[in-house]
Image: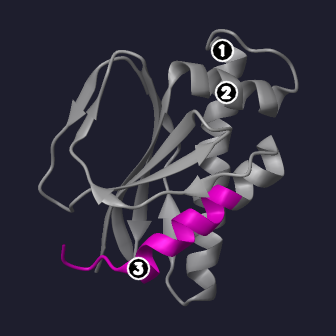
Amino acid sequence: MAGMNVEHINPFLLASTKILKDMCYVEAKVGKPYIKELEFNNDSLIIMIGVTGEMKGQVIIAFENRVACDIASKMCMMSVTQMDELAMSAIGELGNMILGNTATIFSTKGIEIDITPPTIGTGTMTFKHKYAQNICIPLDYEDDKRIEINISIKGD
């Protein structure tokens, strides 16, 4: 796992929990990180954002559809029961805010990164790459809801 350590993971977790709290009023508990293949089932919604600069790779934020609807409901302050255009926009903006905040945290540590616009995917997906190992960190809230932060980056 060349180039990845806890100093590279913590900014993503700090930004994720802060944005979820500030924008969605969600108190997420950080679970134990683990190595995960990038495979998502039919009920998945993902936000994929590339990382460039002094660190390179991508971050995939993954939700079950019901959790994505719950987060979109909280962001839009109205009930969301299906991922329509407004809900997808809200979820994409959540990814932008998390990764933008992460970039700011890295900059305070002297590491400059930039992010790509978010790509949203739904359904069954598998991603394979040899560039960097994927570390998955679960964020749990309200007893039965989980958001997965998948980080596949490495430094120069």
Give above or below for 40 relative to 58: above
Q: Residue at x 45, y 82 (%)?
A: 7
Q: Residue at x 42, y 76 (%)?
A: 8
Q: Residue 122 at what x, y percent from top left?
A: 42, 20
Viewer-side residue, 102 vs 29: 29
Q: CA distance from mark 1 to mark 3?
A: 36 Å
10 Å crowding of disc 3: few (<14), some (14-19), many (20+): few
**Precedes in sequence: disc 1 or disc 3:** 3
Q: Which SS does the magenta portion mostly show? A: helix
The answer to whether mark 1 and mark 3 are in CB contact below 8 A is no
Viewer-side residue, 106 vs 39: 39
Q: CA distance from mark 1 to mark 2?
A: 6 Å
- Residue reaching furthest right? 77
- Residue reaching furthest left? 130
Q: Write down the residue under mark 1.
A: 85
The answer to whether mark 1 and mark 2 are in CB contact below 8 A is yes
Q: Write down the residue under mark 3.
A: 6
**Precedes in sequence: disc 3 or disc 2:** 3
Q: CA distance from mark 3 to mark 2?
A: 31 Å
Give above or below for 92 relative to 22: above
Tag 3's secondary structure?
helix
Kind of residue at disc 1: Glu
Q: Write down the residue under mark 2.
A: 89
Tag 1's secondary structure?
helix
Q: Residue 141 at what x, y percent from top left?
A: 64, 43
Q: Is residue 129 magenta?
A: no
